[in-house]
C-alpha cells in the first residue's frame, strides 16, 4: 500500500463525530497532572535571582553568604554553565538567555539560581546573594533602537541582508526582503495610493499555567525532566546540548500542558533546573511566578510598520509595499521576517515588496505566539486595505474579493499556491447573516483576513493492539487542545473499530523516536498522518495473522470494516475474523500486533480566515465592546468539529484582547511596569460575546483526509477587524494597538478638534 | 537559476556544490517551498519538472 | 515562624494539618494535603484557577491563609463528583468542550457551582459576570458559558423531578 499522503476523498465512519476526549474526566476532577503538580522524593525548591536593570554590566556576583545559609544545597551562576555550544549561535543565545553572562540584557534576566530545602530558605538565600551592577544605557522601543544614537546591545551584531555590509555593529540584525514584480512601476500605474504607519505593542501568550518543571540528575549522568512543554523531545536535545549530557540519557516527560500558544516551545528555567539538580545531587522543582512569566519568558514582538498600497479605479491593486520593524527582545530573531512573509499572503499581487527589519532591544527574548508575527502585519495591511477601499468607494469586502489570491497565484513570499481558502472564506462572509444585521448608534462593523503557513515536522507514532482487541496509541506531539481525541478517532477510523476502543497517550522521550515541537498547528496534522500509516501497518500485520489462522495465502485476505475477510470461492466457508479475534489469537500467531510510523509529514496546508466583527464604543470613556464576532476559516477537514471551533474561538479571543487591552508597559527606567494579570488585562468572560464559527473544508491535497492545521490563523484577523469596525463606528482610524480607551479618546478628541 | 534535481535533497546537494557558501545557510536551517507548500524536513519530496522552488529561512510556529 | 495546627473539614472529611501562619490555603492544599486540583495561575487573586469554597463562599485560595481554614468547611474540585458520579457541570464541561488545556477548569467548575446554587436560572450576562473572576486563555469562554447554561437547565429539571416526587409522597 505504501504511505501515500495524497488526499483520497474517502467516506468516513467516525471522523467528524463529536466524541468526548479521553483526558476529560481527569481534567474536570482535578486529577490531571500539570507542570507544577508533580513532586519527586527529596526534591528541593529552585528559585531565580533576576536583574532589576534593563541593561547592566554584572561586575561581581558574590554568593558566599547565601551558600553558608543552612538548607541551601546549590547555587548556580553562569560560571556553572560553561559555553559548550561550539559556534552554534542560536544555542548560545538560549544559554545566555537562561542565565546572564557578564551582562543583564533586560529587566528580569536571570542572574543566579538557588536550590534549597524549602521556599522560605531559597528566598532568603536570594536576598543574601550580592550582585554589583554597572547600569548601561538601554532601549526598549523598536524605532528608538534603530536611531543612530541608540545604545547598541551587542558589539557582534552587524546587519545581514544588506549591501554593502555595514562596518559598525547596530541593533538591526537582519533585513529580509520578499516579493516580486516592480513596485515602482506598479505605483505609477495606480489611480489611488494609500500610505500609513502603524504601531503595535508587545503582548504575552498569557497561558494560565506558569512554566514549571522537576529536574533530577543522577551522579552517573542520567537525568529526568518532568516539564510543561510543547515539545519534550526538543527540550531534551536543547537541555542535553547546553549541559553536555548524552541526549539518550535524559528522559523528558511532558506533563499535561496548561496552555502554550508558542510560549512553551522554548526553554527558560529548565536547563538551569537540571544544572541545580546536578550540583545538589537532588531533584529540584522550579515553578515560575506569574511575574516571572511576564518578565522573563517569551512574549511576542512589539512592532512598527509602514504600508503603502496602490490600486486602479476599478479596484485592481497595482502595487503593495510594507516595511516591518519587529523587536525580538535582547537576541536576534526571525520575527520581522515572518511578518514580511505573511503580510500580503492573502492577495494576488503583480507587484509586491515586503521588507522585514529584525531588531534587538532590552526586552525578554521573543518567542512564538500563535501564527507568530502575522497578526501585527495583518493589522497594518488590512487597515490600509479598508482605507483604500473607502477611497475607491468600494465595499471593503468586494475590494478584497477582487484581489484575493487563488490557486495559481504567486504568493508574496515566493511560492505559487495550490487550492486555497481565502476566496471561499470571503464569499462566505458575503453570504453570512452577520453582514446584514442592523447596527445601532456608536456601533460599527469591520472585517479582515488572515493567513498562516502551518507546518508539519518529524513525527514518530506507535500503535499497539492488546489481546482483548483494545488499542493503545502512543504519540510524541503534545495535546494542546484535544488532539488525543482526534488521533483516537483517526485510529478508530482506519482500524474500523469504535472510538472507545482506542486510548491515546503522549509518550515520553524514552518511549518513542524524536518528535518535533508541537508548533505551527501541526499536532493533529502530523501525528494524525503518522497514526493513519501506523494503523495501516497494523492492518497489514493483521491480514497476515488472519492468513496464518486460516492457513491460506495472505493475498486471499482483505481488510474490510474492521474485519479480515477471505476472498475467493474456495474460502467461502471461512467466517470473517474481527480485530478482536485476531488480537486474541496473536500470542500464537507471532506475538503482539503493532504498527508504527516514523515520518516527516511536512505540508500542513496553508490556511486562511476571514473574520467579521461588530463593536460598540462608549464615546465618554473610549471603552470598546465587541458585541458580535464571526470566524470563518478553512480547516481542510475537521476531524473533531467541536475542537476545531474551540481553536477558532480561542484564537479570536486572544486577538480581541490584543486589539483592545493587552500591552507590555515599560517605564523610562526600562523596567516592565505591569507584570501581572491585574494590570496586563486579558479578556474575561464578561468582556466577550459568543463567538460564532463557520468551518470551511477545502481539502489539503497532501493529507489522506485533507486535514490542514487549524490552530493559529484565527488570531491573525481580529486586530484589523476591530480597527476597521472602530473606524466604521466612530470615524477614527486607529493606528496604534492596543486600541485602549485612552488612545480611542485621544483619537476622538483629535477628530473633534 | 535553473537546477536539475528530482528531490529536495538532490537540489540542496547541487546547490552546495555550485555555491559552497550555501552550506552556512543550510546549517542555520532552511525550509523549502515547492509549489506553495513549505517543507522543513522532508527532503525526499519529489520536485515536479519545471516547478519553482524557493529557499526560505526555517521558520517556526506557535 | 512556628507552625499552627489547623483542624478543618475538606470535602466532608475531617482533616488536620500544620502550617506556618503566612502560608496560603492554596499552598497548604497543594503541598501539604496532596490536593493539587486547585491551580496557581497568579498567586495574586487575579485568575481564579485556585478557586475553592470556604463555608460555601467562593474564594481564591491563594488569598486565604491556611490557618483561616481552622474550624471551617472547605470544598475543592476533588470533592465535586459524589461517589464517582460526575456533577452535571463536570459532565457538560466535557460534553460541550468547555475545556481545552483544562488548567482553568477546576476554578471555573467551583465558581459555576456556586453561581448555580445561588441562581438556578441565570441569564447569559449573569453567567458571564459571575465567572469574570476566572481567566481562561484557550476557549474564548464561548463553550464554557454554553456548558453552564446546559447544566443550569439540567439541574432545574432534576430539582423539578425531586419536587414532584416529594409532593407525590405527601399526598
Ligand atoms: S492563583 Fe489564586 S487567583 Fe490566581
Ligand atoms: S482551557 Fe486553557 S485556560 Fe481555560
Image (spheres, rainbow, N blue to C red):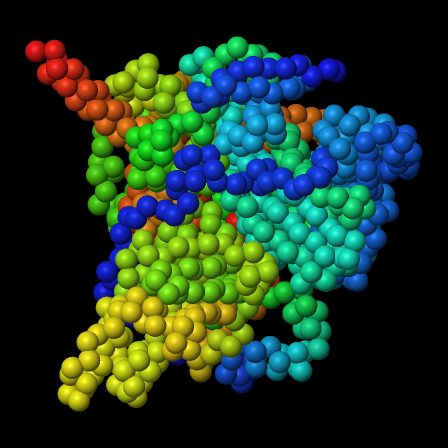
Where residue C101 appears, as percent x and y from the top left, is: 46, 41
Q: Is residue A60 above or below residue C119?
A: below
**Residue sitting at 12 percent across and 11 percent down?**
C170
Quadrant for residue A446, please give it. Answer: top left
Q: Position of residue A333 (x, y in %)?
A: 65, 51
Left or right: where does residue C49 sit relative to residue A731?
right
The residue sitting at 50% across, 83% down in the picture is B6
Question: Quick one: which residue is furthest to the left in this view?
Answer: C171
| Vertical position of residue C113 compared to residue A457: above or below | above
> In the image, A547: left or right of C56?
left
Q: Is residue A509 visible?
A: yes
Residue A302 shows up from this direction: no
The image quarter in which residue A390 lies: top left
Is A681 left, or right, of A326 in this rendering? left
* Residue appearing at x 42%, y 14% in the figure: C56
The location of residue B35, given as percent across then percent down, is 44, 70
The part of the image, by quadrant, that contains residue A733 is top left
Q: Is residue C165 left or right of residue A713?
A: left
Could you say which is closer to the camera, residue A21 or residue A242?
Answer: A21
Give how far across and how far down residue C118 sits, in percent: 33, 14
Query: Which residue is at 41% across, 45% downward?
Result: A23
Between residue C86 and residue A67, name the one nearer to us. C86
Of residues A741 and A212, the one drawn nearer to the viewer in this rendering? A212
Relative to C137, is A230 above or below? below
The quarter in which the N terminus of chain A is drawn is bottom left
Amino acid at each position: 500500500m505504501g504511505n501515500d499522503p495524497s488526499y483520497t476523498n474517502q467516506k468516513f465512519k467516525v471522523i467528524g463525530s463529536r466524541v468526548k476526549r479521553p483526558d476529560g474526566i481527569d481534567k474536570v476532577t482535578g486529577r490531571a497532572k500539570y507542570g507544577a503538580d508533580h513532586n519527586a522524593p527529596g526534591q528541593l525548591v529552585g528559585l531565580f535571582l533576576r536583574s532589576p536593570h534593563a541593561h547592566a554590566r554584572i561586575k561581581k556576583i558574590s554568593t558566599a553568604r547565601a551558600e553558608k545559609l543552612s538548607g541551601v544545597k546549590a547555587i548556580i551562576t553562569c560560571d556553572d554553565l560553561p559555553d559548550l555550544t561550539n559556534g552554534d549561535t542560536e544555542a548560545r543565545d538560549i544559554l545566555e538567555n537562561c542565565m546572564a553572562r557578564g551582562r543583564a540584557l533586560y529587566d528580569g534576566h536571570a542572574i543566579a539560581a538557588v536550590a534549597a530545602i524549602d521556599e522560605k530558605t531559597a528566598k532568603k538565600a536570594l536576598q543574601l546573594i550580592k550582585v554589583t551592577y554597572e547600569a548601561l544605557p538601554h532601549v526598549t522601543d523598536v524605532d528608538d533602537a534603530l536611531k543612530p544614537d541608540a545604545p547598541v546591545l551587542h558589539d557582534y551584531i552587524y546587519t545581514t541582508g544588506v549591501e554593502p555590509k555595514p562596518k559598525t555593529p547596530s541593533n538591526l540584525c537582519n533585513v529580509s526582503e520578499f516579493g516580486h514584480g516592480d513596485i515602482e512601476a506598479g505605483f505609477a500605474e495606480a489611480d489611488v495610493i494609500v500610505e500609513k504607519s502603524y504601531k503595535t505593542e508587545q503582548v504575552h501568550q498569557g497561558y494560565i499555567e506558569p512554566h514549571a518543571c522537576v529536574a533530577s540528575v543522577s551522579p552517573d549522568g542520567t537525568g529526568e525532566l518532568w516539564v510543561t512543554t510543547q515539545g519534550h523531545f526538543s527540550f531534551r536535545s536543547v537541555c542535553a546540548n547546553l549541559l553536555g549530557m548524552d541526549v539518550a540519557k535524559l528522559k523528558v516527560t511532558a506533563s499535561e500542558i496548561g496552555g502554550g500558544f508558542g510560549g512553551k516551545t522554548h526553554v527558560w528555567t529548565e536547563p538551569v533546573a537540571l544544572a541545580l539538580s546536578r550540583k545538589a545531587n537532588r531533584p529540584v522543582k522550579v515553578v515560575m511566578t506569574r511575574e516571572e512569566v511576564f518578565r522573563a519568558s517569551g512574549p511576542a514582538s512589539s512592532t512598527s510598520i509602514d504600508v503603502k498600497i496602490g490600486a486602479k479605479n476599478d479596484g485592481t491593486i497595482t502595487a503593495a509595499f510594507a516595511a516591518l520593524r519587529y523587536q525580538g527582545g535582547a537576541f536576534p530573531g526571525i520575527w520581522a521576517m515572518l511578518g514580511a512573509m505573511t503580510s500580503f499572503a492573502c492577495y494576488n499581487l503583480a507587484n509586491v515588496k515586503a521588507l522585514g527589519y529584525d531588531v534587538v532591544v532590552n526586552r525578554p527574548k521573543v518567542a512564538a505566539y500563535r501564527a507568530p508575527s502575522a497578526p501585527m502585519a495583518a493589522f497594518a495591511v488590512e487597515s490600509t486595505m479598508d482605507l483604500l477601499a473607502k477611497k475607491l468607494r468600494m465595499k471593503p469586502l468586494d475590494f478584497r474579493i477582487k484581489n484575493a489570491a487563488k490557486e495559481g497565484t504567486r504568493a508574496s513570499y515566493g511560492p505559487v499556491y495550490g487550492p486555497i481558502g481565502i476566496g471561499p472564506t470571503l464569499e462566505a462572509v458575503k453570504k453570512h447573516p452577520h453582514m446584514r444585521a442592523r447596527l445601532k448608534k456608536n456601533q460599527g462593523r469591520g472585517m479582515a483576513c488572515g493567513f498562516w503557513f502551518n507546518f508539519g515536522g518529524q513525527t514518530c507514532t506507535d500503535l499497539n493492539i492488546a489481546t482483548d482487541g483494545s488499542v493503545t496509541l502512543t504519540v510524541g506531539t503534545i495535546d494542546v487542545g484535544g488532539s488525543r481525541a482526534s488521533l483516537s478517532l483517526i485510529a478508530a477510523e482506519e482500524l474500523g473499530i469504535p472510538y472507545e476502543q482506542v486510548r491515546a497517550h503522549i509518550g515520553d522521550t524514552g518511549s518513542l523516536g524524536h518528535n518535533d515541537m508541537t508548533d505551527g498547528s501541526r499536532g493533529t496534522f502530523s501525528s494524525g498522518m503518522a497514526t493513519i500509516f501506523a494503523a495501516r501497518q497494523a492492518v497489514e500485520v493483521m491480514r497476515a495473522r488472519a492468513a496464518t489462522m486460516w492457513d491460506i495465502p495472505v493475498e486471499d485476505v482483505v481488510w474490510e470494516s474492521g474485519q479480515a475477510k477471505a476472498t475467493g470461492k474456495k474460502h467461502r466457508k471461512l467466517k470473517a475474523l474481527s480485530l478482536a479475534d485476531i488480537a486474541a489469537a496473536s500470542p500464537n500467531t507471532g506475538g503482539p500486533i503493532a504498527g508504527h510510523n516514523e515520518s516527516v509529514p511536512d505540508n500542513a496546508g496553508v490556511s486562511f480566515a476571514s473574520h467579521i466583527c461588530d463593536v460598540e464604543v462608549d464615546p465618554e470613556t473610549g471603552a470598546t465592546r465587541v458585541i458580535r464576532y464571526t470566524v470563518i476559516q478553512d480547516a481542510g477537514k475537521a476531524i473533531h468539529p467541536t475542537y476545531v471551533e474551540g481553536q477558532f474561538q480561542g484564537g479570536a479571543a486572544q486577538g480581541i484582547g490584543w486589539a483592545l487591552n493587552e500591552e507590555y508597559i515599560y517605564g523610562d527606567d526600562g523596567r516592565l511596569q505591569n507584570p501581572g494579570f491585574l494590570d496586563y488585562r486579558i479578556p474575561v468572560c464578561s468582556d466577550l460575546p459568543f463567538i460564532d464559527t463557520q468551518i470551511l473544508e477545502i481539502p489539503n491535497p497532501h493529507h489522506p483526509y485533507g486535514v490542514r492545521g487549524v490552530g493559529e490563523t484565527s488570531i491573525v484577523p481580529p486586530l484589523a477587524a476591530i480597527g476597521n469596525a472602530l473606524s466604521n463606528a466612530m470615524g477614527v482610524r486607529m493606528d496604534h494597538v492596543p486600541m485602549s480607551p485612552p488612545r480611542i479618546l485621544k483619537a476622538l478628541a483629535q477628530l473633534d478638534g | 537559476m535553473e537546477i536539475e534535481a528530482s528531490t529536495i535533497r538532490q537540489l540542496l546537494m547541487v546547490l552546495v556544490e555550485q555555491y559552497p557558501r550555501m552550506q552556512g545557510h543550510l546549517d542555520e536551517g532552511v525550509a523549502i517551498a515547492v509549489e506553495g507548500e513549505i517543507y522543513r524536513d522532508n527532503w525526499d519530496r519529489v520536485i515536479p519538472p519545471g516547478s519553482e522552488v524557493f529557499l526560505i529561512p526555517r521558520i517556526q510556529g506557535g | 515562624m512556628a507552625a499552627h495546627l489547623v483542624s478543618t473539614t475538606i470535602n466532608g472529611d475531617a482533616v488536620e494539618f500544620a502550617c506556618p501562619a503566612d502560608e496560603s490555603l492554596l499552598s497548604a492544599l497543594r503541598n501539604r494535603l496532596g490536593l493539587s486540583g486547585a491551580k496557581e495561575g497568579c498567586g495574586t487573586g487575579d485568575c481564579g484557577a485556585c478557586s475553592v469554597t470556604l463555608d460555601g463562599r467562593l474564594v481564591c485560595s491563594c488569598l486565604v491563609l491556611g490557618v483561616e481554614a481552622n474550624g471551617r468547611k472547605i470544598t475543592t474540585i476533588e470533592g465535586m463528583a459524589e461517589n464517582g458520579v460526575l456533577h452535571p457541570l463536570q459532565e457538560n464541561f466535557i460534553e460541550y468542550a468547555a475545556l481545552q488545556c483544562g488548567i482553568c477548569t477546576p476554578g471555573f467548575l467551583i465558581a459555576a457551582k456556586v453561581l448555580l446554587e445561588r441562581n438556578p436560572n441565570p441569564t447569559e450576562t449573569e453567567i458571564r459576570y459571575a465567572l469574570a473572576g476566572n481567566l481562561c486563555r484557550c476557549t474564548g469562554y464561548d463553550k464554557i458559558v454554553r456548558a453552564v447554561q446546559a447544566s443550569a437547565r439540567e439541574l432545574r429539571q432534576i430539582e423539578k423531578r425531586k419536587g414532584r416526587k416529594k409532593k407525590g409522597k405527601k399526598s
